[in-house]
Image: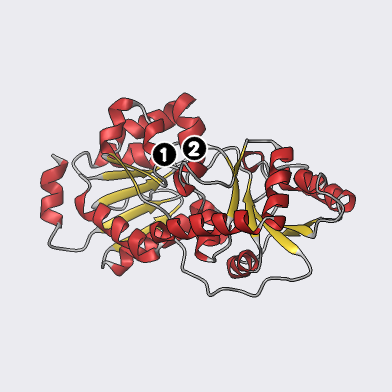
Amino acid sequence: MRWRYMVALYSRPMRIALITPYLPVARNGNAHTAARWDRFLRQAGHDVTLALAWDEQPADLMIALHARRSHAAVARFSALYPERPLILVLTGTDIYRDIRRDADAQASLALADCIVTLQEQGPLELPEAFRPKARAIYQSSPRLKPAKRPLRSFDVCVVAHLRDEKDPFRAAFAARLLPAESRIRVLHVGGPLEAGMAEQAERLAAEIPRWRWLGALAHGETRRRIARSHLLVLSSRMEGGANVICEAVMAATPVLASRIPGNVGMLGVDYAGYFPLGDESALAELMARAETDAAFYRSLTEQCAARAPLFEPAREAAAVQALARECR
């Protein structure tokens, strides 16, 4: 039984295989999650191997990000070490697409001893039989000192790679609807990940003076860009628990987000800054209201600040380290 194996491990550091579909160089959400978890586990004294695939070197514990993409590693580890614990961390495409229709993703759910979602709404998407072994661990970001924001413009930042799941151009379409007197400018950070997206971004930048595509930036520069913005917009179709929400909240930059479960799980059911998925008219109204209605902008800021303790690095580190000790 796996619990007997875990009891034997409590007195010593573990060898942990941490499997991820993207290494830190990818600079996307999965990559940032893997890098943080690697660091937290090493801080607890564990020997961690971070890799795209499992090399079948002996490990006391496997932690796998992404039910579908990491299924081969999950299945092989379970077959070779059936008594050893296996933790599955679910992403947005896992929860809101793959586990509903992909056989590999469904098999990974069944093989895992613990299932982790990255926000509080995630476990509700699981088949009922798997919910008892699920827990939510919020992602985190260090706090940033308040940054000086422009006075002549009202800057709205979008941080999303150009791919369909992110609905990346919704803020551009919204910017086109703003009144002429608006001071809003939208600055989009993110590289093209799908064919034709770069060309579309260039066309929109030429057509919409308020919207500017900055391309991919280094993580530190992206965070500074968020901190210097008055708002962050997240228009995604699906999110497992967007780290960019953590980064905005910890930079005291309020968020406007599509009303999807992954965003509601991060910002709370009563948050005032949601707009219907794909609705640029509603987004434009919220952007304009945030620019012109000081009380509304203050309420967004206060609601985000109330969520900030959930996104503290120390909280995530403690949860990840406890997971490695307890899950069996």
Label 2 belongs to which residue?
A: 261
Q: Are marks 2 and 1 in contact (CB under 8 Å)?
A: yes
Please rate how many residues cluster around mark 2, counting C-alpha atoms within 10 Å: few if below 14, some from 14 to 19, many from 20. many
- Percent coordinates x, y for residue 175 in the rendering: 78, 49
Looking at the image, residue 234 lies above or below residue 250: above
Q: At 38% across and 46% down in the image, what residue appears? A: 64
Q: Is residue 166 left or right of residue 66?
A: right
Residue at image x 73%, y 40%? 280
Q: Quadrant of residue 196?
A: top right
**Residue 257 horizontal/vertical position (percent):** 59, 46
Residue 154 x, y percent position in the rendering = 73, 62
Pick the residue in front: 238 or 7.
Answer: 238
Residue at disc 1, secondary structure: loop
252, above or below 7, in the image = below
Question: Is residue 189 something one can see in this rendering?
Answer: no
Q: CA distance from mark 2 to mark 1?
A: 6 Å
Looking at the rendered image, the quarter that the C terminus falls into is top left
Which secondary structure lies at badge 2?
helix
- Name the amino acid, label 2: Pro
Q: Is residue 4 visible?
A: yes
Q: Is residue 307 or residue 242 the one in the foreground?
A: 307
Q: Look at the picture and state if 121 lies above or below 155.
A: above
Looking at the rendered image, the quarter that the N terminus falls into is top left
